[in-house]
């Protein structure tokens, strides 16, 4: 698909060695490109996606205690062309912090609040990082693997 | 006239709509900052029916979680069955027999019509017309009876299995479907004359609640909300799954971006679903409805995958991460209502309170789908 190539060129030109782009079989994995971009400024990456007309579909957190890391998967979709790009970023589990992209994508606001309450990931620059679906005074992070009720 | 909460001190007030309010269709609370009858800010407060569905997935096997998936968007539960079954089948590489694919599409499209009917009636009630609900529920009853006859449930279906469905459809079901299709076509004409062409209804929805396509893109809105803003995106066409590529159907798109456009999309979608069911019934192959030798306890290989289906309210996506055990390591539910509601704050700014109900109703929210 055309937009996959456009995106690959744009990302390689801008970030080069700092990311790893993996072509994946859509029929098996549900996306076209799987980009591991831990050393990349996520705000800049999101601006590129925005400029290319992508929609932010979801932000999913994943906890990897054995690797001392938290992973965030940003799913982008090019609507009407049916293409999905997953951008993966890992942050340290000790101090999970990453820039917010809610200024670029309004929809990221809620996804980031959710990842914050569920995993304790801090999104710097977020306008209102309070619990979204949990009680307003919740201080626990239920989707962490070491959480017990 | 532009108003701003900071400049007119003491002229604004805050009022809560919900969490117990008939127009929020469930336990949704909207914190409204009002200037008289005009909305200056409307912040949705969600989580009142949050059940931690994603954590529950990390505590049970893949098949045990089937009972949960029909309780996320319980109005369109069959389609969520579809999404979850396909996601796990993709991860574990389970083939699905052809007959099962047809049964899945028939039951899902029936459920889509039932879901749209459950939106249609209450939406008109929001706007002050009580009667259409009674007609809509009569039709919906016919669908629920059909689905009950094959799945045993009327609302929270767990009809699908990995590799097929749990029960075959018989001649009675096929005959019942055909009778329903011909009846429903007449009813859609009735709805057009009763509601769509009604001048009072049109004054309440035309030009009201405009959502530009750019807002849809920024917030990830999908489904009839996006198609009512002129974007022809439908998962069944753009990321085709199952037997949808073999069926002849159109994607209704209306470019007016208002509540009427979203209304028209859903009404036309019911017609298209009828076409799909009819074709699937005509082509229904014989054969098994379950794949052979699907293990009772699934252990998909390590890795992750994404699968999305066109739910009644938009694109429903599941990302499953497997660590090779019988329990999902992580299961992310990307639900359409979550994204569709998140744009409400921006889209409702400056509207009259009474008009914002037309906007809220036209989003077709299912609150358990927002909260999960």
Image (tube, rainbow, N blue to C red):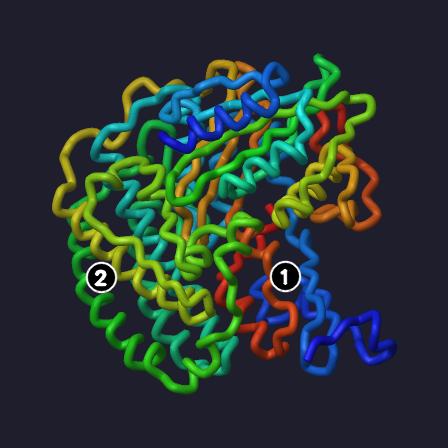
State which quarter of the image contains the C terminus of chain A.
top right
Residue B20 seen: yes
Query: What's the residue at 78%, 27% (across, down)?
Result: A96
Q: Residues within 10 Å of mark 1 (few under 14, many from 20)?
A: some
Residue placed most toward the observer, B316 or B112 = B316
The residue wearing badge 2 is: B180
Residue B155 seen: no
Residue B19 position within the rendered picture, expressed as x and y whole percent measured from the top left: 68, 64
Query: What's the residue at 25%, 38% (across, down)?
Result: B243
Query: What's the residue at 66%, 47% (across, down)?
Result: A110
Q: Residue furthest front?
A: A13
Residue A40 position within the rendered picture, expressed as x and y whole percent measured from the top left: 67, 24
Residue B71 position within the rendered picture, expressed as x and y whole percent measured from the top left: 52, 47
The residue wearing badge 1 is: B346
Q: Which mark identifies residue B107?
A: none
Residue placed most toward the observer, B67 or B188 = B188
Q: Secondary structure at mark 2?
A: helix
Tell me if residue A9 comes above or below residue B308 in the rendering. Answer: above
Residue A138 position within the rendered picture, expressed as x and y whole percent measured from the top left: 81, 43
Tell me if residue A68 comes above or below residue A139 in the rendering. Answer: above
Query: What's the residue at 78%, 45% (across, down)?
Result: A129
The subunit carrying tag 2 is B
Of marks 2 and 1, which one's residue comes earlier in the chain? 2
Q: Residue furthest right?
A: B9
Q: Secondary structure at mark 1?
A: helix
State which quarter of the image contains the N terminus of chain A.
top left
Tell me if residue B138 comes above or below residue B106 in the rendering. Answer: below
User: Label 2 to label 1, Cα distance in Å?
Assistant: 41 Å
């Amino acid at each position: 698909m055309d937009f996959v190539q456009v995106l690959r060129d744009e990302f390689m030109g801008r970030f080069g060695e700092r990311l790893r782009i993996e072509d994946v079989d859509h029929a098996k994995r549900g996306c076209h490109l799987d980009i591991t971009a831990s050393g990349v400024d996520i705000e800049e990456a999101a601006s590129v996606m925005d400029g290319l007309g992508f929609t932010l579909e979801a932000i999913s957190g994943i906890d990897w205690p054995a690797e001392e890391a938290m992973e965030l998967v940003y799913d982008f979709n090019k609507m009407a062309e049916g293409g999905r790009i997953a951008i993966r970023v890992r942050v340290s589990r000790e101090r999970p912090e990453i820039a917010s992209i809610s200024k670029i994508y309004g929809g990221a606001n809620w996804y980031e609040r959710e990842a914050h309450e569920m995993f304790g990931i801090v999104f710097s620059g977020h306008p209102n990082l309070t619990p979204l679906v949990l009680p307003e005074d919740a201080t626990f992070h239920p989707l962490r693997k070491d959480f017990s009720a | 006239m532009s108003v701003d909460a900071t400049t007119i001190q003491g002229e604004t007030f805050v009022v809560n709509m919900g969490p117990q309010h008939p127009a929020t269709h469930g336990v949704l609370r909207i914190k409204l900052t009002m200037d008289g009858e005009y909305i200056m800010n409307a912040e949705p407060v969600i989580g009142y029916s949050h059940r931690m569905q994603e954590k529950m997935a990390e505590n049970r096997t893949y098949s045990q979680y089937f009972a949960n998936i029909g309780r996320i968007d319980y109005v369109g539960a069959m389609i969520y069955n579809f999404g979850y079954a396909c996601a796990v089948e993709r991860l574990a590489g389970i083939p699905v027999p052809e007959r099962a694919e047809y049964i899945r599409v028939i039951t899902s499209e029936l459920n889509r019509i039932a879901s749209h009917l459950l939106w249609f009636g209450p939406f008109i009630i929001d706007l002050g017309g009580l009667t259409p609900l009674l007609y809509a529920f009569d039709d919906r009853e016919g669908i629920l009876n059909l689905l009950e006859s094959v799945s045993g449930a009327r609302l929270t279906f767990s009809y699908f299995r990995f590799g097929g469905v749990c029960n075959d459809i018989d001649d009675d079901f096929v005959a019942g479907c055909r009778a329903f299709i011909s009846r429903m076509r007449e009813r859609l004409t009735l709805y057009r004359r009763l509601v769509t062409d009604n001048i009072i209804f049109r004054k309440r929805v035309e030009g009201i609640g405009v959502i530009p396509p750019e807002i849809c893109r920024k917030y990830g809105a999908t489904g009839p909300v996006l198609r009512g803003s002129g974007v022809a995106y439908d998962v069944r066409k753009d990321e085709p799954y199952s037997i949808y590529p073999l069926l002849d159907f159109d994607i209704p798109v209306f470019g007016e971006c208002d509540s009427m456009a979203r209304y028209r999309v859903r009404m036309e979608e019911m017609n298209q679903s009828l076409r799909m069911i009819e074709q699937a019934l005509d082509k229904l192959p014989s054969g098994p409805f379950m794949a052979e030798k699907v293990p009772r306890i699934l252990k998909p290989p390590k890795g992750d995958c994404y699968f999305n289906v066109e739910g009644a309210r938009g694109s429903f996506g599941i990302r499953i991460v497997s660590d090779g055990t019988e329990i999902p390591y992580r299961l992310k539910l990307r639900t359409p209502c979550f994204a569709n509601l998140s744009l409400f704050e921006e889209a409702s700014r400056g509207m009259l309170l009474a008009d914002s109900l037309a906007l809220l109703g036209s989003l077709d929210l299912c609150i358990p789908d927002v909260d999960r």
